[in-house]
C-alpha cells in the first residue's frame, strides 16, 4: 500500500500535483491511512465522517477532507472533526459557518463544479455568485474549486475537460477577484492523463483511492506501472467439496434472489462451496487467484465454485478483489481483516 501510494504520488508530483489519499473503501482503516501517508499523500479523504473520526482517534495527524457533501444535519460534526469539506449547497455552507462561529473554528471549503458527470457540482454559471457568497461567510475559508468525473456518468477526464475547468476558474477570478489555492482535479480516472505527461496540469490536487488501493487507473482499469494489484486479497474456506452434475435437476424457477439461473451441461464436475456470500461481497467483483477455479454462482452466505485439481474441505481459496468487492468486504463484519507482514519491522507503519 505504501509503495502504491509512493508510485502514484511521484507520478502526480511530476505534474505539480499533490495527492489526497482516499481511504473510504476500507472504512477509513487506520493502517491503510498510515501507509498512504508514509507513501507521500499530503491529506486523507473519506466520504464518511465516521471513518474520519476512526482515523483521527487512532492518532493519525493529517488534514482530513470530507469528500461527500455534508448533510445539513451533520454540519456540526463536520466542523468538529473535519478540516476541509467538498461542498455544492449554500444552505449547507451557511450551516457550517454557523457551527464554525459557535465552535470558534475556521472550516475550509472546496466548491465542486459540475463538469458533466452529473453527480455533485455547482453549475458553472452559478459559480461566481456562489463564490462571492461563500467568501462573505464568517468561519469559512474558501480553499478553492474541484471537479469530479467518471463516478456517475462515466465521463472521462480529458485534457479538454481539465482546460475547461481551468477556464471556468479563471472567469471566476476575473469576476470576483478570488484566487483559488487548491484546484482539485479528480480521482483515479485522472491517472491516464498523468501517465501521458503532456502539458503542465491546470490542477494541483487529485483525490486518489482505487489507483493506490488496487493499482488501477479507472478509465480502462489497467495496472499502473510500479504498483501492486493484490495488496488486498480475500480468503474464504471451503465448506464442501464434491463431484456433482453441472446442471440442477428438477423444475427450475427462481433462485433465492428472484433470478432465473441458466446452466450449461458440462457433465459431472468438482464443485466447492466457500463460506462467504453476497452479504459480504459483490461476487461479480471477485476473481479466483488460482487458475482453473471458476465462480458458478452464489447466495447470501455461499459462493459455489467449479474446482480443478486437488482441493479439500478446510482449504482456503484466494480471490482478487475489484473495487466493489473491496468496499463490501471491508464493510462486512463477517470478514476478518488481517494484516500480513511484520508491522513492527515496517518502519513507517505501526
Ligand atoms: C471516492 C472519491 C474519490 C476517489 O475515487 P477513486 O476512483 O477511488 O480514486 C475522489 N473524489 C471524490 C469526490 C470521491 O467521492
Image (cartoon, helix red, strand yellow):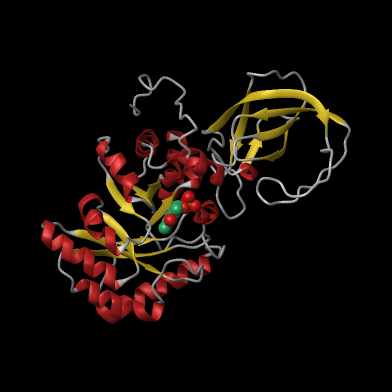
Q: Quadrant of the N terminus?
A: top left
The residue at the point 77 percent across, 25 percent down is 308
The residue at the point 11 percent across, 60 percent down is 102
Nearest to the observer: residue 15 or residue 50: 50
Q: In which quarter of the image is the C terminus?
A: top left
The residue at the point 53 percent across, 37 percent down is 226
Residue at the front extreme of this rendering: 251
Question: In this rendering, is residue 129 above or below 34?
Answer: below
Q: x and y percent of residue 156 in the render?
A: 56, 63
Q: x and y percent of residue 130 in the render?
A: 29, 76
Question: In this rendering, is residue 114 above or below 1?
Answer: below
Q: x and y percent of residue 211 in the render?
A: 50, 46
- Place residue 110 in its image quadrant: bottom left
Q: x and y percent of residue 175 in the render?
A: 29, 81
Rendered-image quarter of ligand 1 = bottom left
Asked if residue 260 lies left or right of residue 196, the reply is right
Nearest to the observer: residue 302 or residue 41: 302
- Place residue 344 in its image quadrant: top left
Any part of residue 174 in sight: no
All told, the count of numbered labels is: 0
Amino acid at each position: 500500500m505504501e509503495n502504491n501510494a509512493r508510485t502514484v504520488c511521484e507520478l502526480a508530483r511530476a505534474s505539480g500535483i499533490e495527492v489526497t489519499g482516499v481511504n473510504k473503501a476500507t472504512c477509513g482503516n487506520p493502517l491503510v491511512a498510515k501507509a498512504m501517508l508514509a507513501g507521500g499523500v499530503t491529506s486523507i479523504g473519506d466520504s464518511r465522517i465516521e471513518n474520519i473520526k476512526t482515523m483521527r482517534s487512532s492518532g493519525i495527524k493529517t488534514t482530513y477532507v470530507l469528500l461527500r457533501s455534508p448533510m445539513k444535519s451533520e454540519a456540526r460534526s463536520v466542523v468538529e472533526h473535519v478540516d476541509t469539506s467538498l461542498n455544492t449547497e449554500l444552505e449547507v455552507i451557511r450551516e457550517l459557518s454557523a457551527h464554525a462561529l459557535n465552535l470558534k473554528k475556521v472550516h475550509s471549503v472546496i466548491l465542486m463544479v459540475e463538469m458533466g458527470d452529473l453527480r455533485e457540482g455547482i453549475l458553472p454559471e452559478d459559480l461566481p455568485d456562489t463564490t462571492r457568497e461563500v467568501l462573505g461567510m464568517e468561519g469559512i475559508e474558501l480553499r478553492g474549486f474541484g471537479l469530479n468525473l467518471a463516478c456517475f456518468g462515466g465521463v472521462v477526464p480529458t485534457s479538454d475537460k481539465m482546460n475547461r475547468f481551468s477556464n471556468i476558474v479563471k472567469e471566476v477570478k476575473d469576476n470576483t477577484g478570488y484566487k483559488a489555492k487548491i484546484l482539485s482535479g479528480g480521482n483515479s480516472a485522472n491517472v491516464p492523463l498523468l501517465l501521458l505527461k503532456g502539458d503542465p496540469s491546470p490542477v494541483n490536487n487529485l483525490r486518489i483511492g482505487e489507483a493506490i488501493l488496487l493499482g488501477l487507473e479507472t478509465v480502462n482499469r489497467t495496472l499502473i506501472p510500479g504498483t501492486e494489484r493484490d495488496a488486498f486479497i480475500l480468503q474464504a474456506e471451503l465448506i464442501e467439496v464434491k463431484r456433482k452434475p453441472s446442471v440442477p435437476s428438477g423444475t427450475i424457477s427462481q433462485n433465492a434472489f428472484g433470478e432465473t439461473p441458466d446452466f450449461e451441461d458440462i457433465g459431472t464436475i468438482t464443485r466447492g462451496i466457500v463460506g462467504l456470500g453476497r452479504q459480504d461481497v459483490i461476487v461479480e467483483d471477485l476473481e479466483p487467484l488460482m487458475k482453473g477455479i471458476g465462480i458458478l454462482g452464489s447466495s447470501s452466505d455461499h459462493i459455489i465454485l467449479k474446482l480443478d485439481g486437488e482441493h479439500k474441505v478446510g482449504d482456503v481459496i484466494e480471490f482478487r478483489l475489484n473495487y466493489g468487492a473491496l468496499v463490501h468486504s471491508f464493510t462486512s463484519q463477517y470478514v476478518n481483516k488481517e494484516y500480513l507482514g511484520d508491522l513492527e519491522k515496517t518502519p513507517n507503519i505501526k
